[in-house]
Amino acid sequence: MIYVLVGGPRDGQHVDDLPRGYRLSLTDPQPEQFAEFDTVRAVWFELDESMFRSTQRRD
């Protein structure tokens, strides 16, 4: 499965694992075909963005 990232720092990227701060889109019930792969949208949430920033500061 391929995830299409929407919003956030990685907007527009296609990835094979779901990065921190992104969640599956609940508005897209069926995966779409892209070549031989199924794709689903993963959206960025602002709440996750604030958690991501605080995690980065600790490092």
Image (cartoon, rainbow, N blue to C red):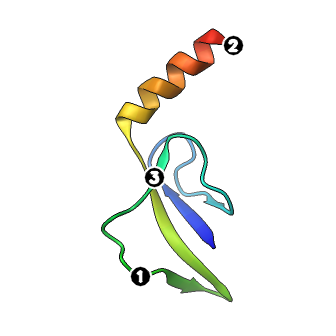
Q: Which mark is residue 30?
A: 1
- Measured as percent of width and height from the top left, residue 8 is found at 48, 42
Taking the spot 44% from the left edge, 48% from the top edge, the residue there is: 7
Secondary structure at badge 2 equals: loop
Taking the spot 50% from the left edge, 40% from the top edge, the residue there is: 21
Q: Which mark is residue 44?
A: none
When the figure is inspected, residue 9 is found, relative to residue 32, above or below; the finding is above
Identity of the residue furthest to the top in this view: 58
| Residue hosting label 3 | 23
- Measured as percent of width and height from the top left, residue 41 is found at 47, 65
Q: Earlier in the sequence, mark 2 or mark 1?
A: 1
Taking the spot 43% from the left edge, 34% from the top edge, the residue there is: 48
| Residue hosting label 2 | 59
Secondary structure at badge 3 equals: strand
Whole-Å distance between the Cαs marked 2 and 3? 24 Å
Whole-Å distance between the Cαs marked 3 and 1? 15 Å
Dots 2, 3 in contact, CB < 8 A: no
Numbered marks: total? 3
Q: Quadrant where the C terminus lies?
A: top right
